[in-house]
Image: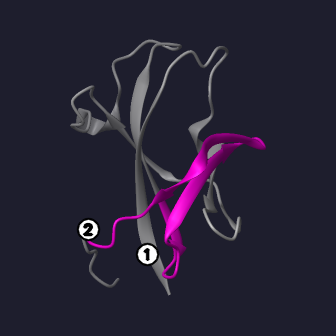
Amino acid sequence: GAKLAAVDISFDNYGDGIDLDDIEIVDGKSDENFGSDPDIVFLTDDGAPFPDNQPTQDFGEPIRVLLLYAVRDSTESIKLRYWGKEIIADPLLLEGDGLALPEP
């Protein structure tokens, strides 16, 4: 089975840009790569979603996003990578309780 992992993360000083679709989620224990192409929700500084998911920042300004990934049910912690470089190198524990999504 699978579960949803949501990562609230901010980026600044990202130079020529960052392609959020290329951020990979990795199992924090086994290093298994679950892939990239997360669903992306752009957030305001206080964590609210932007209307119509359209951020107001100019290119190169700090951004805050919620990245949504599917991971194995057994996944306890995650790391993030971008083109082979660790964004989050120390495993982040996934909280056991969270929002539940209905079965499709």
Per the rendered image, the range of residues in magenta is 69-98
Residue wearing tag 1: 3
The residue positioned 67% from the left and 46% from the top of the image is 81
> Which quadrant does the C terminus fall into?
bottom left
Q: Is residue 94 left or right of residue 43?
A: right
Quadrant in which residue 64 is drawn = top left
Q: Position of residue 77 (x, y in %)?
A: 51, 64
Q: Position of residue 23 (x, y in %)?
A: 62, 45
Query: Can you say whether 19 is above or below 57 in the image?
Result: below
Q: Are marks 1 and 2 in contact (CB under 8 Å)?
A: no
Query: Can you say whether 31 is above or below 57 in the image?
Result: below
Query: Can you say whether 74 is above or below 68 in the image?
Result: below
Question: Mark on residue 72?
Answer: none
The residue positioned 42% from the left and 68% from the top of the image is 4
Badge 2 amino acid: Gly
Badge 1 amino acid: Lys
Give the main secondary structure, helix, strand or loop, of the magenta stretch.
Answer: strand
Q: Position of residue 18 (x, y in %)?
A: 62, 28
One can see residue 23 in this view: no
24 part of magenta stretch: no
- Furthest residue to the right? 84
Residue wearing tag 2: 98
